[in-house]
Amino acid sequence: MEFDFLPKLPKSNLDDRTFKDLVDECILRIPRYCPEWTNYNPSDPGITLIELFAWLTDQMLLRFNEVPKRNYITFLELLGVRLQAPAPAVADITFYLSAALPDTYTIPAGVEVATIRTETEEAIAFTTDRPLVIDKPQIRHFLTCPTADQKPEILRDRFTNLWTMRSDGEWYGRELALFEEQPQPGNTFYLVIDGESQCEGNVLALQLKGEAATATGINPDIPPRRWEAWNGVEWEAVLLQESDDSTKGFSFSELLTQGINPLQGADIVLHLPQSWPVTTFTAYQGRWLRCVYTAPQPNQPGYSSSPRMIGLSVRSIGGTVGASQSELIRNEILGESDGTPGQTFQLQGVPVLNRREDEYLIISPPGGIPQRWYEVSDFANSLPQDLHYTVDSRTGTVQFGPVIREPAQLQQQTELRRGVGNFANIQELERQYGAVPPRGSVIRMVAYRTGGGRKGNVQRGTITVAKNAVPYVARLINHTPARNGSDAESLEDAVIRVPAMLRTRDRAVTPEDFEVLTLQAGGGAVARVRCLPPKTTQEAGTIKLLVVPAANTDAINRGEGIEPELFSLSPQLRDQIIAYLDERRLLGIQVKLQAPEYVGVAVQTEVALEPEYNHPAAQQEILGKLRVALYRFLNPITGGQDGRGWPFGRPVYPSDIVNLFQQFPAVRYLGVVQLFELRYVGSTWVRSLPQNPVIDPGALGLICSWQNTRLRSGHVVNLIQ
C-alpha cells in the first residue's frame, strides 16, 4: 500500500550497468578464461550465449540490486524523514541616508536588495528581516578614564560646569583634552548616548571641532587609537576603516592641508552594533562608546600631547540591518478544496524557507469566515478537528490530513463478505488525521519566502542594488561577506544523518550527541563541530563546543583563500544553536560555544617541472593548480587527507606539502619547503619565522591558509628554471 502523505525521497540506481556494458565486460574476459577462443565476432554462437546471460543478469540487477537501498529509503519515508531544504545566507546591509533627517525614520522590514546582474550571473536577492529605526541620538556625558578597563569604575565627567549643549544637541565650550595632558597608552574617553534613542545598528557621524594649532605628534595615516562600543558582553570595534575618520586621529592640524577648516568640524563615521543595550557603569546610564589610546606598534609614533576639541555633536546618517537571501511572496492562491482527505497543493516558489510567525495558510469556506490553519511537522498527533497542514520545504507541497484505515479492516471486510460483520464497524476503523477543508474552500498562502543555497554567500561590497526605491536612502552596501548559506540536503547526507538521529533520540547526553545536534541546529550553517571533554573538576557539567561555520569555498578554485571573517561565529548563529540545545540537554548542563583557534600557514618552495612542460603558458597553469591544491589542502572545511577539513590540533609538516605535490605528474622535484606560521592579530596577519613543523595549536586549533585583500603572499610557489 502506498501512502500519499509520506515524503517522497529520490530512489537511486545502485548498479547502472546496461546490457551493452555486461556484454562488453564478458568479451574482455574471454582471453583470460578461454584463451583458445580467438574468433568471437557477433555471428559466433558463443556471443549469442553471452548476450543471453547478459540479458538475464540485466534483469536480475534491475530487480534485486535495488532492494537494499529502496528498503532503506522506504524505511526513512515511514519515519517521516524529509530532505532538508537549503538554508539562506545572511548578510548585514548598511543603508546610507541622503541627508540627516529631522525626525526618527524607519525602513520597514521586507525591503528587497540584490547583487548586480551580469551577463553570466543572475542577481541574488536578499530581504531585510526586521525594521531598521534610524533615530536622533544625543550625547549625555563625556567621560575620561586613565585605563581601558573591561567595565569602567573610575570615571571623570568633563562636561559638567565646562560645556553647554545647544538646542540642536551640539556640545561646545573651551578646549577640552581627550586624553591626559601627557597621554599614556590605555587612556580612554567615553561618550554616553541617551538611552531613549533607538540607535541599535545606526551609522553615526561623530563631528569634532578643534583648533588647527593643536599638534599631537602622531602619523595621521596610522593613528594609535581604537573606537569601540559596548554590546552588552564586550567592547566591539565600530570604526570600519581608517578612511571613515576625517579627523585623522584627532590631528586637526593636518586638516588644513586638505582644505578643511577644523573649526567647522570633521566627522568620524562609526557603525554601531545591532545589539547596543542601555547599560549602567558607576552612576552613568546610556549607550556607551569609547576611544582607547592603544600602545603604538613599531614605526608608529604615539601621542606626544593630548588632542583637544572645542565642539562635539552626533547624528545618524544610516543604519545596518540583517537580511536573508530570500524573496517574499504574498497572497498566493493555491486552489480550491474538493473536500477529500489528504489532498495536496503546490506552491509556485521552491524551495520554501522555514516559515515565520506571519507566514501561514488561510482557508476561506464558501460563505464562511476565513480561518487560519496551523503548520505541523506531521499528523501523528492531529485530531479530526485540528486545523493542521504540512509543508515540504524542499518541494513546496502543501498537504492536508489523510484518512488511515486500520489493519483490522481487512479482517472486517472478510467478515462482511461472509455476512458476519456490518458496515458501521468498518467505518469506525477509518481514522482522520487533521481536518479537511470543506469543498469549495479557497486556499491562500498569506506569505512565504523562497531562496537559500550556497550561492548566497556573496563577498563584501556586492549587494548594492535596491529592487524597490527606498525613500531618503542614497545608497546601500554589505560591508561584510554573507554567510551561513547551504545547499539542499542530498540523499547521501540524509542516509548519514538518520542513524545519528536514531541514536540521539533528539536528546543530548554524550559528546557525540552534542556534535550531531549542533549540526542539526545550524541547519546547514555549521560545517564542523567538536565537543571538548572537561579538563578539570571545576569544568564538570560544562560542555564546550568548537563550531566551524560553513563558508563558501568557491574562491579556492580561483587560487584564493577564504576570508577570516567568514569563520567567525555570528551572534545569530550562536543564539540559534544555544536555543536548540537548551531544549535537548540534561538539566544542570551548561553549553558554551566558541570558535576554534585558527593558525594560518604560508608555504614557500620551488618546483621543478618535467621537460615537456617547458612552455610559459603550461608552467603558469601548473603553478596555478599547485596553489589551488594548497588552498584546498590547508583549509578548515576542505583540508586534510580525506578532504573533510583539517583535523583539530594536527600540525602540518613539510612532508605533507611534498606528498601533496607528488600527486601532480608534471612535478619533477621540489626545492626546500618552508612553512611560516600566521597569527591573525586585529585586522592583520603577523608572519613568524620558518617553522618545521608549524606549531601544534593543540586541541583548539585548526590549520588554515589565507590569501585575501590584506594578505597576498599566502603561498609562494616559484618555478626552478
Image (cartoon, helix red, strand yellow):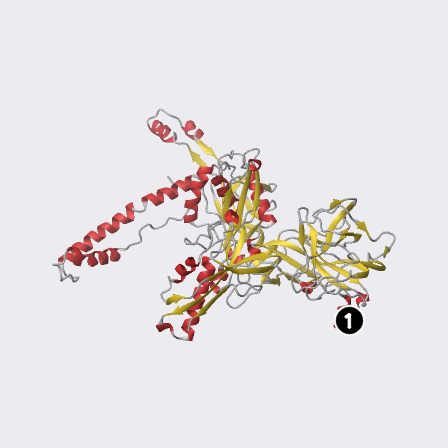
Q: Residue at x 45, y 61 (%)?
A: 630
Residue 575: give x, y in percent of width and height: 59, 45
Q: Nearer the viewer, residue 27 or 666?
A: 666
Mark 1 highlights which residue?
256
SS at mark 1?
helix
Q: Nearer the viewer, residue 478 or 44?
A: 478
For this orientation, the residue located farthest to the right is 161
Q: How many marks?
A: 1
Q: Quadrant of the N terminus?
A: top left
Residue 703: give x, y in percent of width and height: 50, 54
Q: Above or below — where is 208 with respect to 53?
A: below
Q: Above or below — where is 150 with respect to 204?
A: above
For this orientation, the residue located farthest to the bottom is 615
Q: Residue at x 57, y 33 (%)?
A: 588
In this picture, residue 345 sits left or right of residue 309: left
* Kind of residue at badge 1: Leu
Q: Above or below — where is 672 with respect to 494?
A: below
Q: Quadrant of residue 39?
A: bottom left
- Residue neighbourhood size for the residue with mark 1, other residues' Cα within 10 Å, grouped as few (<14), some (14–19), many (≥20): few
In this picture, residue 176 sits left or right of residue 344: right
Q: Nearer the viewer, residue 690 or 127?
A: 690
For this orientation, the residue located farthest to the left is 36
Q: Is residue 250 at all visible to an observer of this figure? A: yes
In this picture, residue 255 sits left or right of residue 704: right
Residue 610: give x, y in percent of width and height: 36, 70
Q: Above or below — where is 558 with respect to 72?
A: below
Q: Residue at x 46, y 33 (%)?
A: 431
Q: Quadrant of the C terminus?
A: bottom left
Residue 77: give x, y in percent of width and height: 42, 42
Q: Is residue 3 at all visible to an observer of this figure? A: no
